Amino acid sequence: MTQLVNSADSHVVEPLDLWVQRLPPALKDRAPRIEEIDGVWRFVVEGMPPRRMGMPSDGDGEREEPSSSSGFRPGGSDPDLRAKDLDEDGVWGEVLYPTIALFGFMIPDPELRWASARAYNDWLAETFAAASRRFAGAAMIPVQEIDEAVAEIERVSALGLRSIMLPMQAPADLPYNLDRYDPVWAAAQAHGMPVSFHVGTGSSPWTERGPGGAVINYVEVGLGAQRTLGYLAASGVLERFPELHVVMVECGAGWLAWLLERMDEAFEEHASWVKPKLAAPPSFYVRRQGHVTFGNDAAGVVNRGFTGIEPLLWASDYPHPEGTWPHTQETLRRIFDGVDPDERRLVTYETTARLYGLQASGD
Ligand code: MN
């Protein structure tokens, strides 16, 4: 019998004209948009290098304007088709992150950045959150302006979005251990919204272009999760906001054991330099309030006796090509081979259900 699972990291695929359609009239000319530059379709965002779009290989030689779903399953933008794909793969609910808007945290102009984030959050709420309670949307919350961030958390909570997403890489000179962020942590805690940090957000994921670049860049972006979780645990954010949950998304799980030991070693061996003096070692707060998502990470499952089972959240990454669809059940059988069924159920269903309100009907 197939056990239903929840995916703690899945993606919508935004229509390419989302921002042109939805930005206020005064900003429409500056909206992030698709444009043909030197015969190649690129996604153009003010103040950022244009991104080449993955083109469908229809082979007819005609260069048509790409549609929103180019290269991805249509379920990326259609909630009904999406639900069919999930049913086929044994997945009940999903936490939804953007695809194009992952880059929106880096829009330099504050007015355009905020208008673009709000437009995405509105579209996500109307298209997916309103369609089914199987979809827990994570709102985009830029963090350069704290008052605006708190106001947007209040707004998206009322829209029915169930989580907030902050950039994995904090803005320059504004690291996550500063108390300027306290109103954000407080608002998220008050609304019971887990705060997530998706891989590759807040900084360019392409930093190395020399030999080994593709692999090196994949390693580099993954390291962001260790840094961010370290900042939140060691600085006392998790201690001061004990109901806050933080989720490092799409960076795997095998590294978590190393981080816990590394932090605790400093906390104990360098005690005279440690400030603030937390009531318990940093690992305690991560085991209580920290989470990591992974799709196919055998080492993370093997380490569960050390990290605890609570931090581990399985995820499909549908409809991205790295994801497990349509082989989710086969992947789960492989990575949970020999694992106690109750533990497997916590990682693949229950903890995500509890954090994001993704309980299946009749459960
Ligand atoms: Mn993802």
Image: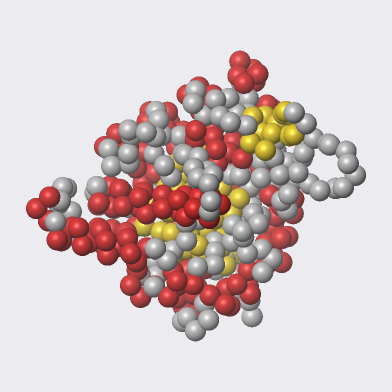
Picture mark count: 0
Point 32% across, 39% down: residue: 175
- Asked if 200 appears above or below 85 in the picture, the reply is above
Return the residue found at the far right: 60
Point 32% across, 60% down: residue: 259
Quadrant of the frame with the N terminus = bottom right
Where's residue 217, x and y in %? 50, 50
Q: Is there any visible trace of residue 159 in the rendered image?
A: no
Where's residue 139, x and y in %? 51, 41
In the image: residue 40, left or right of residue 13: right
Which of 334/211 is in front? 211
Looking at the rendering, which quadrant does residue 166 occupy? Answer: top left
Q: Is there any visible trace of residue 306 in the rendered image?
A: yes
Point 54% across, 61% down: residue: 315
Point 25% across, 58% down: residue: 263
Where's residue 307, x and y in %? 35, 68
Looking at the rendering, which quadrant does residue 13 occupy? Answer: top right
Looking at the rendering, which quadrant does residue 30 occupy? Answer: top right
Quadrant of the frame with the C terminus = bottom right
Return the residue found at the far left: 272
Return the residue found at the far front: 211
Where's residue 153, x and y in %? 45, 37
In the image: residue 240, left or right of residue 118: left
In the image: residue 231, left or right of residue 47: left
- Asked if 156 appears above or below 196 in the picture, the reply is above
- How is the rendered protein coloured? secondary structure
Which of 8/361 is in front? 8
Return the residue found at the far top: 26
